[in-house]
Image: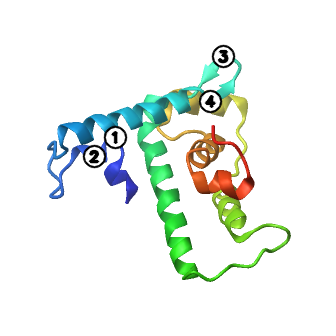
Amino acid sequence: MTHGFDDQGAQFDADGNLKNWWTPDDLKNFKQRGDCIAKQFDAFEVEPGLHGNGKLEEGESIADLGGLVIAYAAYQKSLAGKPAPSIDGFTAVQRFFLGFASHWAANYRPEEARLLAKTDPHPLDPFRVDGALSNVPAFAKAWAAPRI
């Protein structure tokens, strides 16, 4: 769903036509925010001297962030204002974010990580976690962590 509002999907109108439907100010704001995401992912270091390709990964990174924000809002709505219990020393909100992060648990051989970093529009899994979570204020609050 959130790919409809990433750097590619946002180019199509409600009828699926390749057409600019944004106001000039909204388009400028959207592109500036996308540039911020791209710069963030450019900074992730795969290995010394090799960084992510934020422009290539921009669409997936925007969609990951959007999906996480929507899922968190849905989770909050599902509680209907009722508190959720802490389990095993983790609050319910911490467990929500742990669930998101555990989905992306992966190991890469160095050769594969280098290849993917140069060619794949999907960020490497650890960066999908670090990138999205560092942009969600509720994550920082749940872990009493500073926002990056």
Q: Is residue 137 above or below residue 28?
A: below
Do the CB atoms of the residues marked 2 and 3 lie less than 8 Å apart? no
- Point out which mark residue 85 bears: none
Q: Secondary structure at mark 1?
A: loop
* Mark 4 closeness class: few <14, some 14–19, many ≥20 residues within 10 Å: some
Between marks 2 and 1, how big is the CA–CA gap?
6 Å
Q: Are marks 1 and 4 in contact (CB under 8 Å)?
A: no
Q: Is residue 97 left or right of residue 23?
A: right
| Sequence-earlier tag: 1 or 4 | 1
Q: Which residue corresponds to mark 1?
A: 7
Labels 4 and 3: the sequence-earlier one: 4
Q: In percent of the image, x 71 and y 66: which residue is there?
A: 95
Image coordinates for residue 10, horizontal then vertical, percent: 28, 46
Q: Amino acid at mark 4?
A: Phe
Is 136 positioned to the left or the right of 89 in the image?
left
User: Is residue 60 depicted above or below 114 in this figure?
Assistant: below
Quadrant in which the C terminus is drawn: top right
Q: How many marks?
A: 4
Image position, residue 106 (x, y; %): 70, 48
Q: Which residue is mark 3?
A: 49
Q: Quadrant of residue 52?
A: top right
